[in-house]
Every structure is written in C-alpha cells, then in structure tokens.
Image (spheres, helix red, strand yellow):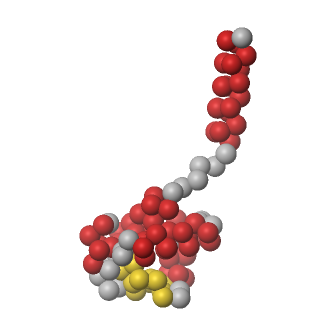
C-alpha cells in the first residue's frame, strides 16, 4: 500500500511541474513597479505609455490579463495612477520600489 501512495505522489509532482506557475497580483505588481522605476528610470510624476512598457522585453512577453492585474494592483497600492494607456508613478510607488 505504501508503494501505491508513493507512486501517486510522484505522478502528482510530475504533473505540477508541467503546469506554469500562476503569479500573484502582488508579485506581478511589484515586478511592473521594478521595471518602471529601474529599467525605464521613471521618477515621481513621470508618465509612461503602455507602448513604452511593451518595448521592454519583460513586459512585452506578459499576457494582457497579467499586465492588467499588475496595473490594478499597483494602482490599488497607490504606486501608479492608471489613466487609459498612461501610467504615472507616484511618491508611494518610488518608495515601494
């Protein structure tokens, strides 16, 4: 019986490794903030368009729901002001980076 349970655990581990990991809103929001502050060298009040961010290979590879989730989280934390396709860095955003 122990062998059967061990085999099930091995199969479950293999299946979990094949699935892509789902990032949390907090993790992806922090990643977006890092890109804006450190890679795009944006400062307080600085504005970036979505097109500016897509040029970054990291953001350009994201799926749209991930990007929207990151923007929503960052805005809810007060790090960014999101207005249509423009993101504005806030004082809180620079402090959190």
Relative side of 87 to 95, left or right:
right
| Residue found at the very far front of the displayed protein | 1
Residue in view at x 29 percent, y 74 percent: 92
Quarter location, residue 11: top right
Quarter location, residue 34: bottom left
Relative side of 66 to 11, left or right:
left
Q: Is residue 92 above or below residue 8?
A: below
Of the pair 89 and 1, the residue shown nearer to us: 1
Quarter location, residue 63: bottom right
Place of residue 71 in the rendered image (x, y in percent of width and height, measured from the top left): 49, 74
Res 31 seen here:
no
Res 69 seen here:
yes
How many labels were placed on the picture? 0
Place of residue 32 in the rendered image (x, y in percent of width and height, measured from the top left): 45, 68
Q: Quadrant of the C terminus?
A: bottom left
Residue in view at x 53 percent, y 81 percent: 50
Residue in view at x 41 percent, y 83 percent: 81
Residue in view at x 51 percent, y 57 percent: 24
Place of residue 23 in the rendered image (x, y in percent of width and height, measured from the top left): 54, 55
Q: Is residue 40 above or below residue 25?
A: below
Place of residue 21 in the rendered image (x, y in percent of width and height, measured from the top left): 59, 49
Of the pair 31 and 57, the residue shown nearer to us: 31
Q: Is residue 91 above or below residue 62?
A: below
Q: Quadrant of the N terminus?
A: top right
């Amino acid at each position: 019986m122990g062998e059967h349970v061990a085999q099930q655990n091995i199969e479950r581990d293999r299946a979990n490794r094949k699935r892509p990991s789902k990032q949390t809103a907090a993790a992806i929001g922090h990643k977006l903030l890092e890109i804006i502050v450190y890679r795009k060298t944006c400062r307080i009040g600085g504005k970036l368009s979505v097109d500016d961010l897509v040029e970054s290979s990291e953001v350009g590879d994201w799926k749209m729901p991930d990007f929207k989730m990151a923007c929503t989280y960052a805005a809810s934390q007060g790090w960014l002001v999101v207005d249509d396709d423009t993101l504005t860095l806030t004082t809180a955003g620079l402090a959190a980076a």
